[in-house]
Amino acid sequence: MTSRHSLTLSVLDDRLAVCRLAPLNPGESQPVWASAGELFSITQTVDELSVVCDEDAVPNGVTSELGWRCLKAHGPFEFSMVGVLASLTGPLADAGISIFALSTYDTDYLLVKEENLESAIEVLSERGHTILR
């Protein structure tokens, strides 16, 4: 079965970490290390400050999950385009591969654990996506 969308994705080089910290107080600055690497994401809710960054930048003692690799979907995608993430996450879920998704204005990023990267590439390729290294 092919996906609704045939996308092109690139495998990024960096090994990433997903971190959880307490939310920042008003006026408090984000940790400097949180913006390390070519790809980083800092999201705050009332419950937490979530950081994705280069895993080598994460200080000892920070609650984190290390060893993530990133697949970047080549965008930009129009906001009216339906099912972009589903065309990627559905096949991976069917294969039992857990992901952490990030979206920006232009595109989407899928983080998979490094030990699942080759399987994820195989699954997505079989579903009609092109993976560039």
Image (cartoon, rainbow, N blue to C red):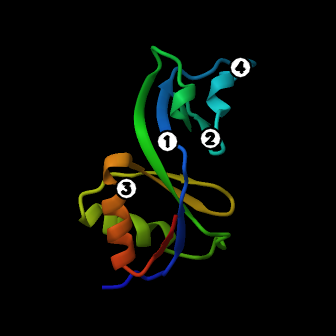
Mark 1 belongs to which amino acid? Arg
Q: CA distance from mark 2 to mark 1?
A: 11 Å
Which of labels 2 and 1 is toward the front?
A: 1
Mark closer to the chain start, 2 or 1: 1
Residue pictured at 64% horizontal, 72% vertical:
77
In whole angstroms, how far apart are the C-alphas of marks 3 and 4? 38 Å
Whether label 1 touches label 4, CB < 8 Å:
no
Alpha-carbon span between mark 4 and mark 2: 21 Å
Q: Which residue is mark 3?
A: 117
Q: Can you name the residue that lies furthest to the top here?
A: 61
Sequence-earlier tag: 3 or 1: 1
Secondary structure under the numbered disc 1 in the rendered image: loop
Observer-nearest of 54 and 7: 54
Q: Earlier in the sequence, mark 1 or mark 4?
A: 1
Question: What is the x, y in percent for residue 25?
Answer: 65, 17
Which residue is tagged 4?
Answer: 26
Tags 2 and 3 touching, CB below 8 Å: no
- Residue 99 badge: none
The residue type indicated by label 2 comes to Phe
What is the number of the mark on residue 15? 1
The label nearer to you, 1 versus 4, is 1
Mark 4, other Cα within 10 Å: few <14 / some 14–19 / many ≥20: few
Residue 91 percent across, percent down from the top left? 32, 69
> What is the secondary structure assignment of the residue under circle 2?
loop
- Mark 3–mark 1 Cα distance, whole angstroms, equals 11 Å
Q: Nearer the viewer, residue 38 or 20?
A: 38
Which residue is found at the position 53% from the left and 29% from the top? Answer: 56
Disc 4 or 2, which lies upstream in sequence? 4
- Indicate the amino acid at tag 4: Pro
Residue designated by label 2? 40
> Vertical placement of 38 versus 49: above or below?
below
Q: Decide which of tag 3 and tag 4 comes sooner along the chain.
A: 4
